[in-house]
């Protein structure tokens, strides 16, 4: 009877060890270049061209999910570096778009909003759009939507 208990413990140990090995070796959906998820650039571009905020928010918010607030003495909001990282990720992910910062925390809402200019092309027609980004002091960036660019 003692032998059966020992064999059962060994069997349980082997099962647990196997389970731990399997779980620890799982490949989570991580981009080879880092932690960011892949975005569908065709979908994003369609959202931009058609001013479809639902599509744009879905794709862009994938890129900001891991960007935590980092307050510094020069940035009391803590999102300036994250906004630059978002722009870099958009440029790296979608090579047919020109992306740049219009303003940081310039729209005085609660939380403040920033704006990103997106330039792309739709069948030979230049498209300029503005992406509104929520820049809270206590949580991640979040794309709020897209609208046409009315500047020069």
Image: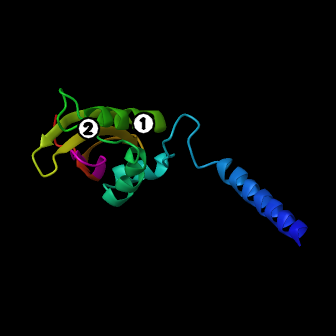
Tell me if mark 2 has few (under 14), some (14-19) or many (20+) residues whose alpha carbon lies within 10 angstroms of its own: many
Residue 2 drawn above or below residue 137: below
Q: Nearer the viewer, mark 2 or mark 1?
A: 2
Name the residue located 87 percent from the left edge and 68 percent from the top edge.
Answer: 2
User: In the rendered image, which residue does mark 1 sit on?
Assistant: 89
Horizontal side of residue 23 vs 106, given as left or right:
right
Name the residue located 22 percent from the left edge and 47 percent from the top edge.
Answer: 136
Residue 74 drawn above or below residue 99: above
Q: Is residue 52 visible?
A: no
| Residue 62 picture location, percent across and down | 43, 50
| Residue 65 picture location, percent across and down | 40, 48
Label at residue 79: 2
Residue 22 drawn above or below residue 75: below
Residue 47 drawn in magenta: no
Name the residue located 50 percent from the left edge and 46 percent from the top edge.
Answer: 37
Horizontal side of residue 126 vs 96, given as left or right:
left
Majority secondary structure of magenta residues: loop
Name the N-terminal-most of marks 2 and 1: 2
């Amino acid at each position: 009877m003692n032998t059966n208990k020992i064999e059962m413990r060994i069997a349980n140990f082997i099962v647990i060890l196997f389970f731990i090995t399997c779980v620890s070796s799982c490949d989570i959906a991580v981009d080879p270049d880092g932690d960011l998820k892949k975005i569908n650039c065709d979908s994003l571009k369609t959202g931009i061209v058609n001013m479809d905020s639902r599509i744009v928010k879905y794709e862009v918010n994938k890129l900001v999910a891991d960007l935590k607030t980092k307050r510094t003495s020069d940035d009391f909001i803590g999102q300036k570096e994250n906004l630059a990282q978002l722009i870099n990720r958009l440029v790296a992910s979608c090579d047919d778009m020109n992306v740049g910062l219009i303003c940081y925390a310039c729209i005085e809402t609660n939380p403040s909003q920033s704006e990103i200019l997106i330039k792309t092309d739709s069948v030979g027609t230049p498209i300029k759009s503005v992406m509104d980004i929520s820049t809270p002091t206590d949580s991640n960036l979040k794309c709020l939507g897209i609208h046409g660019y009315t500047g020069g």
